[in-house]
Amino acid sequence: MIRIIILVLFSVYLTAGDLYLFNDRFQPSLRIDTVVDSYTMLDTSDISEIDTIEFIGNYPAKPMLYSLLLPGLGQYKNGDPLWKSAMFVGVELASFAGWAQWSKKAEDIRNQYEKFGDIHWTLKSWVENTKDGLYGLNQYEDAKIDGTHKLTLHLSGSLAEVFGEFVSSDSLVNYPEWIYSEDLSLSKDQHFYENIGKYDQFVGGWDDINLLYTVNKIVEDTTEVILMTPNKNDYISERDRSNKFLKMANFAVTAIMFNHVISGLEAVFTNQRQARDKAQKTTKTDVGLYFDPRNKYGVGGIAVSYEW
C-alpha cells in the first residue's frame, strides 16, 4: 500500500513540475474569490451575511383570471400601456350600456304590443267568428278552433269541478257556451301572445276582422296565403321590432363574453412574451478554461457558466 502511494506521488511530481506556477488567464469563468485550504480553518462567526437567491415565479394564469373577471385588469397587472386596458374597459362599458338600453327598449315595446293585443283580440270574438264562419273564415282551412295550435283556458267554480282547472281551447268546439261564463278565463302567457299574431287559426279574434285581407308569402317554391287584418299587422310589426331589439341585446351579451375571453388570452400571451424577454436579458452564458493546480499546465478543463 505504501509503495502505491509513493508511486502516485512520484508520478504527480513528474507531470506537474510547475504545479504552483499560477497564471491569471486560467481564471475560471465562474469566479471563486475565496479559496479555503482546510475546512478546519473556516470560522463561521466571520460570516455576517448569506446571499440568498430569490426565485420569482411567473404564473400566466393570474393575468388571465384578472381579465376574465374584469377585462383590462390583466393588462394593467402586466404593466401594459393604459390605452390597452382602457380599450377593453371601453368595450365592456359600451356593450353593457347597449345591452341595458336595447333590453329595456325590447321590454317596453313588448308591454305595448301585449296591451294592444289585450284590447283588440278577444276569445269571444274568436270563437263566434271562427265557429260560424263569419267574414268568410270558413273558406280558409287554417281558420278553425281545433287547429294545430292551442290556447290554455283556466276554469273555476262549477266548470273546474267537472272538467278540471286547466283545459285546451279545443274544448270550445264542444262547449262554445263557455265563452259567456264568468268561470272561464284565458291564460295570457308567452305562447298566447305569440299565437294570436303568428297563426291564421286565431285571426277571427281581432276586432277588425271585417277588414280581413290576405297576403301572399313566398316560402321556398310555394306561396303561402296569410290571413291579415290592420290591427293584426300592427301587432306583428311591433312584435318584430321588439324581437330585433332583443337580438341586439343578445349580441351585446355575446360581445361582453368575447371581450372577457380576448382580454384574458391577450393578457396571457403578453405575460409569456414579457417572461421570455426578461429571460433573454438576464441570462448570460460564459465559457472559459478551468484552473487545476494538479495539472502541469494548470488547465483542468473547460468551465461553462449559465447565469439567470
Image (cartoon, helix red, strand yellow):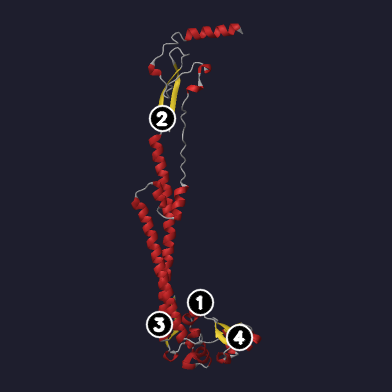
Q: Is residue 196 left or right of residue 165?
A: left
Q: Name the residue under label 3.
A: 234
Q: Mark 1 Cα within 10 Å, few/some/many (few <14, many 20+)?
A: few
Residue shown at the point (41%, 90%) measured from the top left? 211
Q: In front of the other: label 3 or label 1? A: 1
Quadrant where the C terminus is found in the figure:
top left
Q: Name the residue under label 1.
A: 190
Q: Which amino acid does label 4 sit on?
A: Ser
The image's mark for residue 43 is none
Query: Cβ–Cβ below 8 Å for labels 2 and 1?
Result: no
Q: In front of the other: label 2 or label 4? A: 4
Q: Earlier in the sequence, mark 3 or mark 2?
A: 3
Q: Position of residue 200 (x, y in %)?
A: 48, 84
Query: Cβ–Cβ below 8 Å for labels 3 and 2?
Result: no
Q: Which of marks 2 and 1 is nearer the N terminus?
A: 1
Q: Name the residue under label 2.
A: 285
Query: Cβ–Cβ below 8 Å for labels 3 and 1?
Result: no
Query: Cβ–Cβ below 8 Å for labels 3 and 4?
Result: no
Q: Position of residue 253 (x, y in %)?
A: 43, 63
Q: Earlier in the sequence, mark 3 or mark 4?
A: 4
Q: Name the residue under label 4.
A: 156
